[in-house]
Structure formats: structure tokens, C-alpha cells
Amino acid sequence: MRTKLADLWKPAMGINIKDLKHGIYLFQFYHKDDMQWVLTNGPWAFDNLTLVINIVKAGEDLIKVSLNEVEFWIQIHDLPYDTKNNSSIWHEYMRLRIKIDVRKPLKRKTKIVKKDKTEVVVTCKYEKLGDFCFICGLLTHTERFCNKKLETADGGITREWGKWVRAPPRRMTGNSISKWLRAEGDGDWG
């Protein structure tokens, strides 16, 4: 894990990763810009499990640091739009950066109240979402280790979440065509 994360993050001034206790690590950055880049460009995952990262304040007990929230980019789909807006720039969704409490289930849908007091149900999709439980919607485990599943002997479990909660990558990697590459004679540059 240490090598993979260091290679992924590429901190200019380096990083030290210490194992504090099972499942809890201290990431020591040697420059604040390296730390800020990691915090800003997450969420991060290792073995497809979401890493919960927080800043340790001076004098704070390392083991007692709150590890309950992760920032995600969420795509809000099925939003109503203004039919009077004739802008040619229309997106399928709105993006919001919000903190998710890992002790609560992921929101699949939510109600939004419009100005005229009518309600609209919108769909939430999470960017860079790692593994999570399709039974209870928590990020803290997968369905294999879900207490609901383990406590239900008859196997009559309803999976209310699915892969559809994951937003597709915004940038395609490994494309054979660049958006910057133009064919000869494509446009007149005078």
C-alpha cells in the first residue's frame, strides 16, 4: 500500500506512511502543497476500498482523530431545467463536492423543492466510488461482511444499491484519439 499510494500521489517533497494500528495509518507529508493536493483530488481508494483521510492537529491523539467523513464529487441527475434558457451549454447533471458520513448509507435519490414548492426526485451518482455494500449502502464494508446479510438466515435480502450509483469516469483514459488532435484541413486558421 505504501509504495502504491506514494507512486500514485507523487509528492514532490516525499511522504512517510506509518502503520499506527490495524487499518489506521499516518500519512506524513513534507510539504503542505503535497498534502493539499491529496486532500483536494480524492477520494482515494486502495484495493477499491475508500480511504478516509483527515488532518491531524498539533497535540491531537493520532488514534482518536475522527475518520467519519469523505469528500466526494456527486453528480445530481434528473434535475429539471429552465426551458427559457436557450444556452447551447446543457449538461446531463450538476456536480457538487460534499462530505459523506461513512456511518450513513449513500443517498441514491433525494427530493429537491423548487421555487413553486413542487418536489422533484433526483438521482445521486458518486465519482471515484470504491467498493461499498449493496445491501445497506455503507462504505465501511462490502455485502460479504454486511451484518444485515449475516443476521438473515433465509437469504431474503433486498439490494437497494447497485453499480449504477457509481458515476462513469469524467475523463476517459487511454483514448486513442485526443480532443486536441485535428485532422488536416479541419477549420480555417488563415
Image: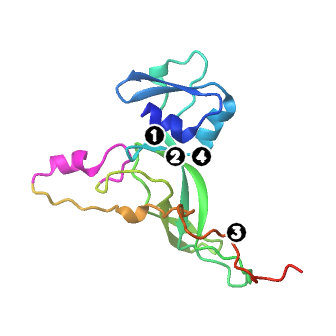
Q: Do the residues labelled 4 and 2 touch (CB within 8 Å)?
A: no
**Residue type beneath disc 3:** Trp
Q: Do the residues labelled 4 and 1 touch (CB within 8 Å)?
A: no
**Residue type beneath disc 1:** Leu
**Residue type beneath disc 2:** Pro
52 part of magenta stretch? no
Q: Do the residues labelled 1 and 2 touch (CB within 8 Å)?
A: yes
In the rendered image, the residue lying farthest to the left is 154
Looking at the image, residue 141 sits to the left or right of residue 11; the answer is: left
- Name the spot of residue 140 as percent of width and height, x first: 36, 43
Q: Residue 41 carries which label?
A: 4
- Name the spot of residue 81 as percent of width and height, x first: 64, 77
- Please, what secondary structure does the residue beneath circle 4 have? loop
Q: Mark 1 points at which residue?
A: 51
Q: Is residue 100 above or below residue 177?
A: above
If you read the primary sequence from the N terminus, does the residue marked by circle 3 or circle 1 appear first?
Answer: 1
137 part of magenta stretch? yes
In the rendered image, the residue lying farthest to the right is 190
Q: Which residue is drawn at 36% across and 51% down?
A: 131
Q: Is residue 78 above or below residue 132?
A: below
Q: Residue 43 carries which label?
A: 2
Q: Which mark is residue 180?
A: 3
Residue situated in front as seen by the camera: 37 or 123: 37
**Residue type beneath disc 4:** Asn
Residue situated in front as seen by the camera: 106 or 178: 178
How far apart marks 3 and 2 lie (CA) works out to: 28 Å
